[in-house]
Image: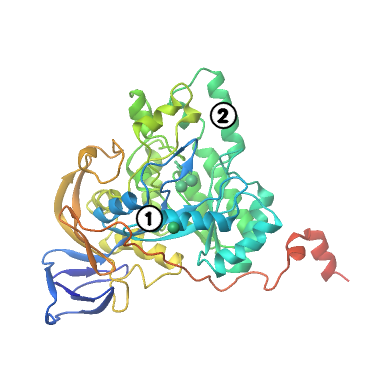
Amino acid sequence: MAILIRGGTVVNHDHARRADVLVDGETIVAVAETIDAPAGAEVVDAGGTYVMPGGIDPHTHMEFPFMGTVSADDFEWGTKAALSGGTTMIVDFCIPAPGQSMLAAYQDWRHKAEKAAADYGFHMAVTSWSREVWEEMETVVRTYGINTFKHFMAYKGALMVNDDELYHSFRRCAELGAMPLVHAENGDVVFRLQQHYLEQGVTGPEGHAYSRPPEVEGEATNRAIMIADMAGSPLYVVHTSCRPAHEAIARARAAGKRVYGEPLIQHLVLDEDEYRNRDWDHAARRVMSPPFRPREHQASLWAGLQSGSLQVVATDHCSFTSEQKRMGRGDFTRIPNGTGGLEDRMPVLWTAGVNTGRLTREEFVAATSANIARILNIYPKKGAVAAGSDADIVIWDPRATKTISATRQVSRIDYNVFEGFSCTGLPVVTLSRGRIAWKEGDLRAERGEGRYVARDPFPAVHVANSTWRELNAPRAVERAEVTP
Ligand code: DUC
Ligand code: ZN
Ligand code: ZN
Ligand code: ZN
C-alpha cells in the first residue's frame, strides 16, 4: 500500500527541507516539494513535524544469557520498545557461549530474533582465539553478512580476550574487510579492584562504580587504538563513557586513524550520584558497565558529538528486572550488568541535545541513524529519507511532551533509569519498512515482522590472501623475509 507523508520537513544528516514523502510497499519512492496522492494512498498529515530516518541502535543485548541470568527484553519486546521510541533497527551482539562455535551462536541468535518486530542485524563476538575462530570469521563475514566483530577487554574469566587475541583478531578483521569493536575496560585491573573493595567491606552497588574508574576505560581505549593501528584495522569503541576514553579517540582521529566512538544516552544525562546515598534497588538498577560517571565527563561526551570525534549515540539496551538485580545483594560483582533505554534514546537525546542547542536537527539524525548506517555499510538503504531507501521513517513532533515513567513503557522491566525525565520532542508515527508500526501510542507492529539485515564487508584494507601461518608469524620472521 502507498502512504503519502504530507506537509512535513524532511531532515537528513546533511540537510533539511520542506518535502512530501511517498512510500510504496517497503520503500521510499519519492521525496519532493509536492507530491499528489496516488489513488488509494493513505495520507499522513505531517504538518509542523520533522520527517526523519528511523533510528538505528547499534548496541543491544536481547534475551542475552549473562551473569547467571538472561536479559529480560527479548527480540519481540525490545524491538517493540524501539519502535515506540522512533528506532526502526537494532544491531544485537551474537555472543558464543563458552566452547560454542560462532556458527552455532549465529543460528541461536537468528532463531531468537525470529520474534523481532523491527529490522535487526548482528555483531559477532570473538571470545577466544584459535584456528577454528580464524576460519569461522570468514564464514561470518562472507556468508552471514556480519562485518563487525566485538571484543571484550573486560569480564575476566568469561568473555575477556587478551592483547595477543586482540592483535590476531584485528588483523583478521582487516584482512576480511570487517571492523573490530571493543568494550574497552582493563579487565585485570577491574578484577583486582573488585576484590579490593569487597575485602574493604564495600558490597553495595557503589562498589561497582569504584571498581571501574575512568582510568580503566581510558587505558583500554588507548591500548585498543594502538593495537588496531599496528594490526592495520579500523576500530569502533562501544559505550565511550568518559573523558580519557573520548580524548584517546579524538587524538587517534586527529592522527588520521579510522577510530569511532559511541557514547550511550545514559552516560550523556545520568551520573554517578545515582549510586550514592540511594536505596539498594535504585542503585542496583543502574549498574551497567561502564558505570555512570562523575558529571564532568558528560561535557566531554557532548563536545565529542558536537565536534564529530564521537559519532553515534546508542543504548547498550540490556534490561534486567529488579528481581534479577537482587541476585547481587551482598556482592556488587553479582549484580547483572545492564540498563534499558531503547524507547527513550531519541526523545532524551532530542531534549538534552537539540532543545539545549548542543546539536542541530541534522546532527541528531547523524548521531541516531545516518552515521551508524554509514559505519556499518548499510547506507542509504538505512539511515536516509531518500528515494530508494527502506521506508524506515519517524515523524517527529518537536513540541510534543511526556514525562518518562516505567508505568507507561513497552519494555518488560519494572522500572526506568530515566524515570521522571521530561521530554519535549517525541515520535508521533514510526514506519517500519513501509508499515505503520506505532502511531500516537498505538503499537501496531507485530512479532515476527522484522527482517535480518545482512551487511557487505568493506574493501579489505590489510594483507590480501594472507594465510594462517603468515598471520601468526612473529614480526622478526616477517622482517627476515624482507632483509637480505
Ligand atoms: N555492559 C553491560 O552493562 N551490560 C551488557 C554487557 C556490557 O558490557
Ligand atoms: Zn527458528
Ligand atoms: Zn560492553
Ligand atoms: Zn553491550
- What label does residue 305 carry, if any? 1
Left or right relative to 326: residue 45: left
Secondary element type, mark 2: helix
Question: For residue 194, what is the image quadrant?
Answer: top right
Tell me residue 63's x, y (percent): 42, 46
Tell me residue 261's x, y (percent): 46, 54
Rate crowding at label 2 as few (under 14), some (14 to 19) or many (20 or more) other CA atoms within 10 Å: some
Q: Quadrant of the C terminus?
A: bottom right
Secondary element type, mark 1: helix
Left or right relative to 476: residue 12: left
Instruction: Name the residue located 33 percent from the left edge and 52 percent from the top edge.
Output: 76
Q: Is residue 386 visible?
A: yes
In the foreground, 255 or 396: 396
Instruction: Name the residue located 30 percent from the left edge and 56 percent from the top edge.
Output: 447
Residue under label 2, please give it.
193
In the foreground, 231 or 345: 345
Q: Is residue 309 visible?
A: no
Question: For residue 369, what is the image quadrant?
Answer: bottom left
